[in-house]
Amino acid sequence: MGYRVAVVGATGNVGREMLNILDERHFPIDELAALASRKSLGTEVSFGDTTLKTKDLDTFDFTGWDIALFAVGSEATKKYAPKAAAAGCVVIDNSSLYRYDPDVPLIVPEVNADAIMGYSKKNIIANPNCSTAQMVVALKPLHDRARIKRVVVSTYQSVSGAGKEGIDELWDQTKGMYVPGQEVDPSKFTKQIAFNVIPHIDVFMDDGSTKEEWKMVAETKKIVDPAIKVTATCVRVPVFVGHSEAINIEFEDFLDEDEARDILREAPGVMVIDKREDGGYVTPVESVGDFATFISRIRQDSTIDNGLNLWCVSDNLRKGAALNAVQIAEVLGQRVLKKG
């Protein structure tokens, strides 16, 4: 016996990826609804060998449906998620709307799956920010061994994190660089993204950080440990898919780089590729389409007593969004709904 599952925002990048991953992981489904806004009504999306036509989110009745995977912005989520939850359908939300709500669990299954039981307060589970999701997968097994005091992270985030408009802008600007008179001015991003990097993701806050950087701080504390100190610099780079992070970690206890490498090799969701030779590391292009969070460049930080550096790469449309949401649904099914 399977589940009745609705994918909300099925025509977007993340929604389509959710459909792909539900199929790839053979999630037990009896009935699947692809939902979108009225302007996308009837658009066809793929689910394995099946083609689905989208239904109107505005008029959809969630009564009798088990799980709704939301891949729409916060405004639409604010309107429709409570309706789905009130109808008895468990919402797994990819937007930022509920991440910091104390009554809504923020889940990365490899890290804090037990916290999923808190879903019953609002019938909603939150999916973390893409940059946070991959980082905490790497941090948790190391934290369990040596207790993390402080994290300094610099991100290199792909344009797909900004949606289809971000992908289109990089593509159009890159083409325009080679065709006189067809240059494309920035619209989605604040500055040219082609052949450039932009140290600005989301809005600026009063302390000079951006909201993307604040998210990494707040979410790491909620998911892993409120005692961990985090400082982040988030940068948009001209890469289509795949987020990368340079992470510096300070521990309470000494952790040798070889032991850290062994711990990470055994950690769920992690793949270590760390050879000290040309090409002995993973880049974002190589992470595309993969489920894993890749770790490379593990090395001691000699400037502090108990420090390590590492390089972390993952497909942001997968582990950073769609895959994590489906993994949450799997945990929910195994521990709560128990149909599949």
Image (cartoon, rainbow, N blue to C red):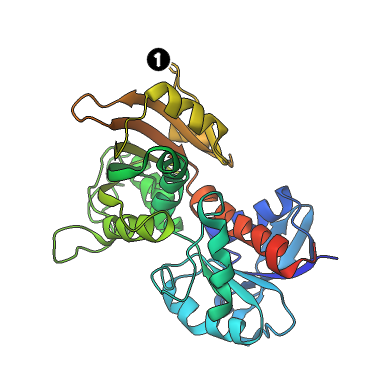
Q: Position of residue 294 (x, y in %)?
A: 49, 34
Q: Position of residue 310 (x, y in %)?
A: 36, 31
Residue under the image location 61 percent in, 80 percent down:
57
Residue pushed farthest left?
A: 207
Label 1: how many Cα within 10 Å (few below 14, some 14–19, many 20+)? few
The residue lying toward the viewer, choosing from 104 and 188, is: 104
Judge whether 54 appears above or below 127 on screen: below
Examine the image and state in which quarter residue 33 appears.
Answer: bottom right
Q: Amino acid at mark 1?
A: Arg
The residue lying toward the viewer, choosing from 102 and 330, is: 102
* Residue that mark 1 sits on: 276
The residue lying toward the viewer, choosing from 157 and 260, is: 260
Residue under the image location 50 percent in, 43 percent down:
315
* Residue 242 shows in the view: no
Position of 188 compared to 323: left or right? left
- Say which quadrant the C terminus sits in: bottom right
